[in-house]
Amino acid sequence: MSAPRKTSARTQAFNLFSPIELSGVEAWYDASDTSTITESSNQVSQWNDTTGNGWHLTQGSSVQKPLTNTVTINGLNTILFDNDVNQDGDQMLTSGNPTTGS
């Protein structure tokens, strides 16, 4: 009979990055960063662009606001766009007033 086989755990480090490190990125939305989300009763009225370019997303119509804090993936917050709410579906619009860029 052979000796028991030894196993070892292998880990890999992940480097976090910022969206501004990527060339040509105009906007970046991170639902796991809840500080970028303005919500009331889980309905999202604004989702801020994290690049600093000012392409924030907004929605004023309560029937078209997506939801937050309702679904997670791997323990991270998500934004849920639910087309079942009404015929128009949930949507967010750009602010149309970027602070930088063209």
Image (spheres, rainbow, N blue to C red):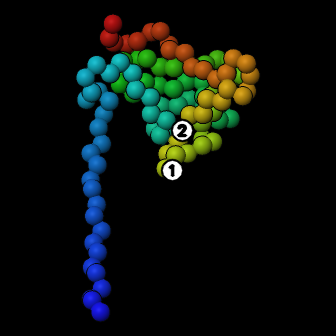
Left or right? Give the position of 36 relative to 23.
right
Taking the view exactly as shown, the residue that stands out farthest to the bottom is: 1
Which residue is at a point 26% across and 53% down the rendered structure image?
13
The residue lying furthest to the front in this view is 1
Query: Is residue 35 shown to the viewer in this render?
Result: no
Q: Which mark is residue 78?
A: 2
Q: Residue 68: name its quadrant.
A: top right
SS at badge 2: strand
What residue is at 25 percent from the left and 23 percent from the top? 23
Residue at the location (49% across, 50% down)? 74
Q: Residues within 10 Å of mark 1 (few under 14, many from 20)?
A: few
Q: Residue at x 49, y 35 (%)?
A: 31
Determine whether 74 is above or below 56 in the image.
below
Residue 19 in percent (x, y) is at 32, 30
Above or below, 99 against 51 in this view is above
Query: Please, is residue 44 above or below residue 3 in the view?
Result: above
Relative side of 47 to 80, left or right: left
Q: Quadrant of residue 102?
A: top left
At numbered mark 1, what does the secondary structure look like: helix, strand or loop? loop
Q: Which residue is mark 1?
A: 75
Q: Residues within 10 Å of mark 2 (few under 14, many from 20)?
A: some
Residue 93: % across, % down:
55, 15
The N terminus appears in which quarter of the rendering?
Answer: bottom left
Question: How much space separates mark 2 and mark 1, taking CA atoms?
Answer: 9 Å
